Structure formats: C-alpha cells, structure tokens
Image (cartoon, rainbow, N blue to C red):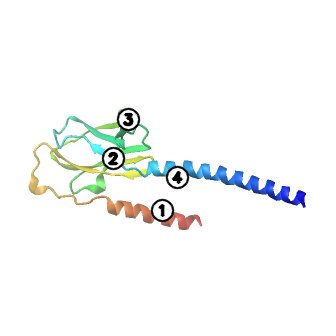
Amino acid sequence: MKKAFISVAIIAGVLAGCNNADTSKNDDTSKNASQSAIEVKVDIQTPDHVKAKKDIELVAHVTQADKAVDDADEVKFEVWESGHRDKSEILMGELEKDGVYKATTKFSHDGVYYMYAHTTARGLHVMPKKKITVGKPDLSKVKEDKDDGKMDMNMMDMDHSKKDEDDH
C-alpha cells in the first residue's frame, strides 16, 4: 500500500512539475503576445509639397509605446500618381537610425501623388497614407484617391484563405 501511495505521489509531483513548466512557457507566450498587441505607429515625415525632378526622401518614423522600432520586418513605400494606382512603384525603406526608415525617389513632373508606408513590425502591419503635391499641378485633372487600404487588406485575407484551401 505504501508503494502504491509513493508511486501516486511521485506521478503527481512529476505532473505538477510538467504543469509548472508549461505555465512558464504560457507566461512567456502571453507576455510576448501582449507586447506585440501594443500598437505600432508610423509617422510619415515626407513633406506635403515637393519639387519635380529633384531627389525626394520618403521618410517613416516607426515607434511602439513611444520607443523607436529599429527591427521592423519591412518598410515599403508604395507611390503612385493620382488616378494611376495600377502603376504604383514600390521602394524599400532602409533603417537610418532611431526608428527612421528612408527611401529616395524623384517625381518626373508636377502632379498629385499618394504614398502608403507599408510597415510590418513585431507581428503587426500598418499602412498609413500620405498625399504629396509635386510642383504646381493642374488640379482640375487630379483624381482624388479615396482608397484607405481596407480593400487591400481584405483582398490579402481572401488570398490567404484561398492559399490555405489550396494547401489542404
């Protein structure tokens, strides 16, 4: 009887130890999950008005909890002229320092352009948008771009679900 009791006590102790080990793993996971749930903010610092045919820096300052994010997975600048989203150009942002990512471009002519700073950092994706006026465009020819990126995100979700179906 004593042997049976000791065996049960040992098994219970081993199970309790395993449970504690799993709990510490869960604590780490939940700590990381709560940290990644803190909003990543992207402040586009590119000027609103620039000149045509001059090098222009596209600038995004990435932060989380008011601290610079120097380890973003990627910062991509998508730029297009109003009415020509289908002809957008993607430029990869490079970390300069203190959460500031930059890319350089040149606008060939006056016009109104739009830019998304597609930013993926710490498990989150944000894509703020900015309107940039180049030179002195004929505003009667400008088509306002009302796209806020939500359709793109939904399309991305649909593409992922299709891919998941293909994988099964």
Q: Quadrant of residue 145?
A: bottom left
Distance of label 2 from label 4 (alpha carbons): 22 Å
Kindly report which numbered mark, 4 or 3, lies closer to the viewer in this rendering. 4
Count neighbours of disc 1 (C-alpha within 10 A) and say few if under 14, some if 14 to 19, many if 20 or more.
few
Q: Position of residue 119 (x, y in %)?
A: 37, 47
Task: Tell me the residue that label 2 is attached to.
Answer: 41
Query: For the view shown, which residue lies furthest in the top direction?
Result: 97
- Check disc 1 and report its element: helix, strand or loop: helix
Q: Amino acid at mark 2?
A: Lys
Q: Going by the image, does 126 lie left or right of 58?
A: right
Which is nearer the eye, 162 or 111?
A: 162
- Chain-order first, disc 4 or disc 3: 4
Image side of residue 51 versus residue 120, left or right: left
How crowded is the residue under tag 3: few (<14 C-alpha within 10 Å), some, or many (20+)? many
Which part of the image, by quadrant, shows the C terminus? bottom right
Which SS class for mark 4? helix
